[in-house]
């Protein structure tokens, strides 16, 4: 369905009520055959949900020789996502689907939700009925087992990804076919048409060298693998959950890489609903992300109301403007990991500094007690928020000073005092500030490029999109670290005698 048609279609709801897709009942495991023979499973050749490139977002059964995505006439017969939603209960709304080109010529343009008319703050842009929202409660048909699964070894995202993979294997017989087709089109891409780093190659991950995000990506990937290894738990625990699917159990039906792609796709579009039951808190909402753009300075959120999930806009829009929603108070490292983009104006951006008291210190237990008395832990995480670097450095100093106390009599004085400030000598203060400055220098040196080099790279309009978002992330991290270093230098310059040599500290705190 082309965009011109969507712009003329004024969201008129169909008067015909759609058949509600059957919730998957939870029956006794003994009532069904636990395993289907290889022969029966292999004798059924499920058709692909979408014609797509070899890295199809959800499930692909064959590798395409042609890397370009092809839209078949058969798919067009089902229409676009919004038309399908209207046929199945979406009421009149004030949005249309538009498209923007992909940076990769191999892939089709991605869709986004735009205002179909001028909107004012406080207006309802759309209201998606619960019959078109995918949640664990809906998928599993029983809230109790939904809670059981998500408090065991599987996350909500893994369960939702598994459900959509099985649904996709049904091809256009699935009720969710148009929605899954749209997810495949989006390919888990963010606003810059970039996939999460979870799907990047080793070479592409090198763009994040120096950033803690690189390790976060690798740890998240290990977590996804652990969930994949537990997928069969769902198949066995949920009884007849997948009885309608004539396929093998999950780990036999889906290779890990396919599950990983599906997991990332679900991760990029799942909505965290507030004030709902545990089994409904994570929802997949057609017309929601990734069709909606995330913005950190936006306050509009998808909200659960009676029988629907709706969006009330928080700002005026002109017809054709892209609709934005709030993604929660997430730093850019999480925005990149979850959604594949970086927000340069993210007021919630932050980096982490971890400080720990030295466990080899003979006075470790006393220092630990003092730290806890002042609301800190023996291993304390400090969040350095953008624009608040100096404040965080000042907040770290009492903790670091505590670690530098070595004389037992001084430690007793600290224990008997009620405040968080440790009285230290000028040379000890210099030692504390020098350690802090060296820490920030070391972190900055871990990046392969400087800030000025980053600026030069970003000026290249032909820069690879993945490299661009990676550089945006590390550049913002470096700016916060540089501000911390400058704040530390300023404190050193304020010392009565900044030429004083720092005192030795045999049990200095550890910075990570």
Image (cartoon, rainbow, N blue to C red):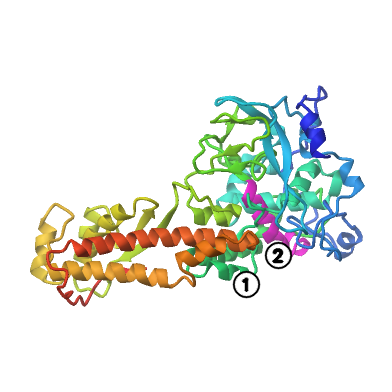
Q: Quadrant of the N terminus?
A: top right
**Residue 310 spot, x, y in % from top left:** 62, 30
| In front of the other: 275 or 51 | 51
Sequence-wise, the earlier of marks 2 and 1 is 1
Kindly state the secondary structure of the residue where label 2 is placed.
helix
Q: Residue at x 66, y 29 (%)?
A: 126
304 left or right, relative to 30: left
Q: Residue at x 24, y 66 (%)?
A: 433
Separation of residues labelled 2 and 1 (CA atoms): 18 Å
Q: Quadrant of the C terminus?
A: bottom left
Q: Residue at x 57, y 58 (%)?
A: 469
**Residue 192 spot, x, y in % from top left:** 63, 52
**Residue 334 spot, x, y in % from top left:** 52, 54
Q: Is residue 319 above or below residue 256?
A: above
Q: Is residue 239 visible?
A: no
The residue carrying mark 1 is: 203
Q: Write down the region rendered in magenta.
A: 250-269
Determine if the magenta segment contains residue 357: no
Task: Check residue 257 in the rendering and tell me which mark sits there, or answer none.
Answer: 2
Q: Is residue 279 above or below residue 158?
A: above
Kindly state the secondary structure of the residue where label 1 is placed.
helix
């Amino acid at each position: 369905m082309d965009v011109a048609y969507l712009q003329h279609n004024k969201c008129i709801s169909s008067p015909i009520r759609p058949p509600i897709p059957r919730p998957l009942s939870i029956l006794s495991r003994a009532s069904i055959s636990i395993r289907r023979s290889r022969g029966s499973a292999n004798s059924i050749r499920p058709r692909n949900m979408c014609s797509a490139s070899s890295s199809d977002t959800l499930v692909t059964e064959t590798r395409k020789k042609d890397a370009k995505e092809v839209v078949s006439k058969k798919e067009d017969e089902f229409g676009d996502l919004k038309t399908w939603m209207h046929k199945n209960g979406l009421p009149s709304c004030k949005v249309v689907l538009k498209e923007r080109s992909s940076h990769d010529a191999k892939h089709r343009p991605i869709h986004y939700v735009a205002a179909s008319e001028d909107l004012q703050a406080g207006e309802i842009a759309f209201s998606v009925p619960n019959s078109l929202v995918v949640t664990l409660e809906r998928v599993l048909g029983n809230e109790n087992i939904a809670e059981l699964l998500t408090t065991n070894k599987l996350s909500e995202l893994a369960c939702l990804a598994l459900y959509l993979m099985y649904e996709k294997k049904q091809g256009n017989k699935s009720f969710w076919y148009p929605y899954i087709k749209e997810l495949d089109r989006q390919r888990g891409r963010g606003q810059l048409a970039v996939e999460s780093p979870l799907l990047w190659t080793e070479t592409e991950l090198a763009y994040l060298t120096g950033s803690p995000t690189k390790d976060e990506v690798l740890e998240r990937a290990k977590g996804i693998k652990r969930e994949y290894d537990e997928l069969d738990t769902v198949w066995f625990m949920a009884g007849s959950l997948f009885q309608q699917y004539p396929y093998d159990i999950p780990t036999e039906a889906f290779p890990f890489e396919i599950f990983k792609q599906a997991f990332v796709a679900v991760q990029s579009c799942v909505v965290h609903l507030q004030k709902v039951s545990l089994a409904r808190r994570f929802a997949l909402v057609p017309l929601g992300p990734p069709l909606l753009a995330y913005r950190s300075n936006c306050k509009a959120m998808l909200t659960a109301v009676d029988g629907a999930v709706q969006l009330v806009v928080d700002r005026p829009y002109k017809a054709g403007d892209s609709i934005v929603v709030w993604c929660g108070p997430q730093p850019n490292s999480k925005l990149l990991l979850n959604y594949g983009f970086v927000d340069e104006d993210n007021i919630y951006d932050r980096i982490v500094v971890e400080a720990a008291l030295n466990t080899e210190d003979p006075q470790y237990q006393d220092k630990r007690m003092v730290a806890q008395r002042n609301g800190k832990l023996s291993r304390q995480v400090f969040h350095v928020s953008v624009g608040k670097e100096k404040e965080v450095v000042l907040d770290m100093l009492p903790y670091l000073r505590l670690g530098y106390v070595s004389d037992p009599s001084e430690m007793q004085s600290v224990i008997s005092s009620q405040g968080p400030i440790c009285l230290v000598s000028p040379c000890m203060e210099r030692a504390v500030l020098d350690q802090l400055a060296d820490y920030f220098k070391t972190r900055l040196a871990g990046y392969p490029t400087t800030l000025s080099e980053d600026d030069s790279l970003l000026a290249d309009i032909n820069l690879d999109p993945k490299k661009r978002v990676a550089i945006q992330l590390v550049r913002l991290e470096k700016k916060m670290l540089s501000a911390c270093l400058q704040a530390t230098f300023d404190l050193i310059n304020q010392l009565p005698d900044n030429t004083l040599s720092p005192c030795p500290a045999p049990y200095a705190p550890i910075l990570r």
